[in-house]
Image (cartoon, helix red, strand yellow):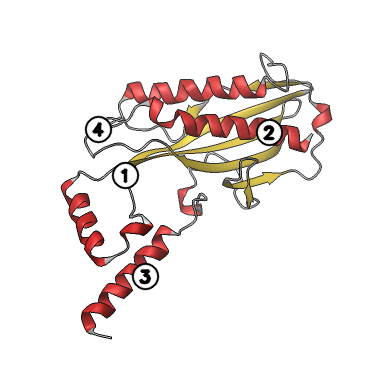
Amino acid sequence: MKPRLMVSALCIASIGMAGCASNVTQPDEYSGFLSDYSRLKEAKSPSGVEVMRWVDPKLDLSRFSAVYIEPTQFYPKPQATTRIPDSTLRGINDYYNQALKRELARSLPLANGPGPGVMVVRAAITAVSSKTQSLKPYEYVPVAFLAAAVSTGTGIRDQETTLGTEAQFLDGANGKVVAEVVRKGTGKPLSNDSQVMKADDVKSVIDGWASDLHQSYLKLR
């Protein structure tokens, strides 16, 4: 094989491997919001998304007759930017609260606080980002790769919006953690590196999170 072709083949192979990387949250992305990450195992949510999850094998959901959803939060507290302003961060947090209440109320009455028979949901948004999208499989050819590289360098390539969350579920009677989950998702792409991210761009991600929590409850019950 000619040197130039060999170099191209190696580049394409390495890019392809990066593009196939798992979308599951990696340990270096954990925020510290949860108290114990060592027991998390890779699993699939009811919608088929890869997540890191742990459920107490002794969990008995029949003991719970209501659910209390603590106000969601950002952890750690994010620094607003021109591309992800305070209004966007507030909108994301508010919508997460609404989505959790909307979905979980389909199975259990909402409680005003923790207590006996109450499951407590404590959730945080642990990542909000916008970055240049990775190359797609159809771009793994030399000519298209060069064109894509130029687009990335000039800032006109689509930007990928990413959201991460960590949540734990507690027995409201004693504060014992009975389940934990860590996951992330990709929202609507932004057209370039100057477009401002809005809460609407990641609402579908949040809807998926909330729906999966409800479906997980039904499955475990």
Say which residue label 4 marks: 195
Residue name at image x 35 percent, y 64 percent: 15
Q: Going from the N terminus, do you reach mark 4 or mark 3 first?
A: 3
Of label 3 and label 1, which has the lower sequence position? 3
Badge 4 crowding class, 10 Å Cα cut-off, few under 14, some 14 to 19, many 20 or more, is some
- Furthest toward the top, the residue is 112
The residue identified by callout 1 is 131
Q: Position of residue 28 (x, y in %)?
A: 46, 53
Comes first in the chain, label 4 or label 1: 1
Q: Secondary structure at mark 1?
A: strand
C-alpha separation, residue under disc 2 versus residue under disc 1: 31 Å
- Who's the residue at 36% across and 39% down the image? 129
Q: Quadrant of the C terminus?
A: top right
- Disc number at residue 13? 3
Q: Amino acid at mark 1?
A: Lys
Which residue is more in the foreground, 172 or 183?
183
Between label 2 and label 1, give the one nearer the viewer.
2
Label 4 amino acid? Gln
Viewer-nearest of labels 4 and 3?
A: 3
Residue 215 numbered tag: 2
Which residue ends up furthest to the bottom in the rendered image?
1
Answer whether labels 3 and 2 touch (C-beta < 8 Å).
no
Q: CA distance from mark 3 to mark 2?
A: 38 Å
- Mark 2 / mark 1, whichever is N-terminal: 1
Mark closest to the chain's N terminus, 3 or 2: 3
